[in-house]
Amino acid sequence: MSKSRKSCETRTRSRTTYGRRDTSRSTKECGRTVSKQVKQLDRVIIRFAGDSGDGMQLTGDRFTQESAAFGNDLVTLPNFPAEIRAPQGTIPGVSSFQVHFADHDILTPGDAPDVLVAMNPAALKANLADLPKGATIIVDTHDFTKRNLEKAGYSENPLDSIDDTAGPLADFGVHPVDLTGMTVEAVKEFGLSRKDAARAKNMFALGLLSWMYGRPTDTTESFLSKRFAKVPDIRDANITAFKSGWNFGETTETFVVRYEVKPATMSPGTYRNITGNLALAWGLVAGGVQSGLPVFLGTYPITPASDILHELSKHKGFGVTTFQAEDEIAGIGAAIGASFGGALGVTSTSGPGVALKSEAIGLAVMTELPLIVVDVQRGGPSTGLPTKTEQADLLQAMFGRNGEAPVPVVAPQSPGDCFEAAVEATRIAVTYRTPVMLLSDGYLANGSEPWRIPDVADLPAIDPAFATADDLTEEGEFQPYARDPETLARPWAPPGVAGLEHRIGGLEKADITGNISYDPANHDFMVRTRQAKIDRIADSLPPMEVEDPSGEAKVLVLGWGSTYGPIGAACRRVRRAGYHVAQAHLRHLNPFPKDLGEVLKRYDKVLVPEMNLGQLSLLLRAKYLVDAIGYNQVNGMPIKAAELAEAVGHLVAEAEGIPLEELDLSVATSQEVHQ
């Protein structure tokens, strides 16, 4: 056998295959015909990982857009350092993007990747522990130098022991490929420096993965043409690298299997891929349109909420005004002023900003003006983990103000649901004349999913019902703190209407007149009235939706916010294993739905998964005296469905008297399953 022939064969020896139905075709390489198989898969999880300057977020986003265009259901998980430019080649500087795409309905970005694309030693080491046995690793060999290996904490090159059954990579199918070298060679005609040429390696990797999984390529080529239109050499180099990666997959013997994941079956409609921050921004625009109010965003940039400002600044045509203030307090102060003037005041921030805005939120409670406070939660306390997700601001949203200052709290459950939650927050704020806390988080903000674009006719009409001269008493007086008998909301009287002049500010108001009052009995009455107004919101909420397919469940898993996906996936797995479990999810956290107490009483045990130390559990125990059992995680990452499924399974076994040694969760902990 010739040396070149042997090299072609040994390059595929560590390949791992998975799938259901195989077909094959042929291409030529190394002077002979290479058979290319096509395998059908129902789902795949891919993670792109590299240095924070390697363009992994762009690569993952483009693969996501290709998959969305193809028609797969998908969920993504971007993960990147907080530093603008973390130390190159180090584990803290690793950036990754995980995409889970399937031919059926899925709920999470996946617990563990089937495929890891690692662009350097640090990316390999940082992600290796997440890989299940049999996973595929595609690794760029170019940066596996002695210096880079040392920076990543390797004493020896792990690629030198691929065939060693005791080596660190023995459990995986490893494909060492010089992505950088092939990229530089492919784009040399454009006269770029080696450094600039090497930057296109992420597009080479994207082209290779696009070939492996049959992704449409025209969307990426069009994107690159537009993005780099002003720098033709960079544009052409990136497009060439992308095509070269695709051609490499088509012709090389290194990869002899191509995978096919068919489009998912979805309800009819027009879909697009959307992130949580984008959906939330559009929901605020829709809220303004449906209420007939101009939207004013007063904000200060903060991770991970800044994209809301970026997006809303593009929509002046819908009556949106954006104001980037000098600090958090100025941002909310301007938003309250806009609400006083008759606009829909909005401010966006994360947990540290909510702390700074707390006094101003209390002012909005006292003045009883519509205001939306968007809190895109991140890891804390203090500056904490700016780019990691958490759900630890619930108690802050509920109680983080001086005095009795009740505020409604609304939380979306998925990236697309951020749109609906923003419209709902607008409805509550305008109808009940109150600030509303809208709790998103970093996972929802940066993650994405297919979203069916709603019909505008299906969106709720929101009536601001401004006060007019017709609201004056027979004596010609305006009563700024009179109450709507149904909602307990006071009149909204923007300045400039003759006869509707009134006092406003942070001092306690007298009932009806709104004059400053220090009377103890009046203060007691006004405190109770403001609380009653928030409680009255529950009258407008729909009944709780409980998913209990068999009707025989003794365990309820109750969540809020972005735990919806992991909870849903975990419950599916437990049911697939043959056990009974119910699931419910809260959008409204203050006030709770009126029938929540009744729902909780139906079940012997209630499990509450949260990315905090038990904040919703605390509220449920206090209000309903239910023995809520917490499943708590605060590691900056979403809860893993398989681990949660095991916890649910053990609780089900306890509730139903099943001996643990008889509990079989092998299906529940293997992979995300169909509904």
Image: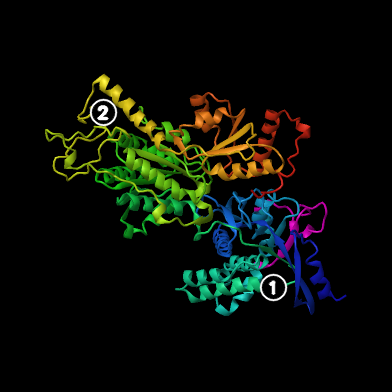
Q: Is residue 276 magenta?
A: no
Q: Which residue has dot 1 on it?
A: 250
Give the vertical position of 424 relative to 526 (above or below). Answer: below
**Residue lying furthest left:** 475
> Is residue 675 visible in this depiction of the protein?
yes
Give the vertical position of 338 relative to 485 (above or below). Answer: below
Picture quarter with the N terminus: bottom right
The kind of secondary structure element at disc 2 is loop
The kind of secondary structure element at disc 1 is helix
How many numbered circles does the render carry? 2
Residue drawn at point x = 35 percent, y = 39 percent: 435
Q: Position of residue 336 (x, y in %)?
A: 29, 42
Q: Earlier in the sequence, mark 1 or mark 2?
A: 1
Q: Position of residue 350 (x, y in %)?
A: 44, 43
Q: Position of residue 273 (x, y in %)?
A: 51, 58
Q: Position of residue 345 (x, y in %)?
A: 32, 46
* Separation of residues labelled 1 and 2 (CA atoms): 73 Å
Span of residues in magenta: 151-179
Query: What amino acid type should be assigned to the residue bearing mark 2?
Result: Glu
Q: Nearer the viewer, residue 231 or 334?
A: 334
**Residue lying furthest top:** 521
Q: Which residue has dot 2 on it?
A: 508
Q: Nearer the viewer, residue 286 or 384?
A: 286
User: Would you call the spot at circle 2 few (<14 residues within 10 Å), some (14-19), or many (20 or more)?
Assistant: some
Residue 656 falls in image quadrant: top right
User: Would you call the spot at circle 1 few (<14 residues within 10 Å), some (14-19), or many (20 or more)?
Assistant: many
Residue drawn at point x = 82 percent, y = 74 percent: 5
Residue drawn at point x = 34 percent, y = 37 percent: 361
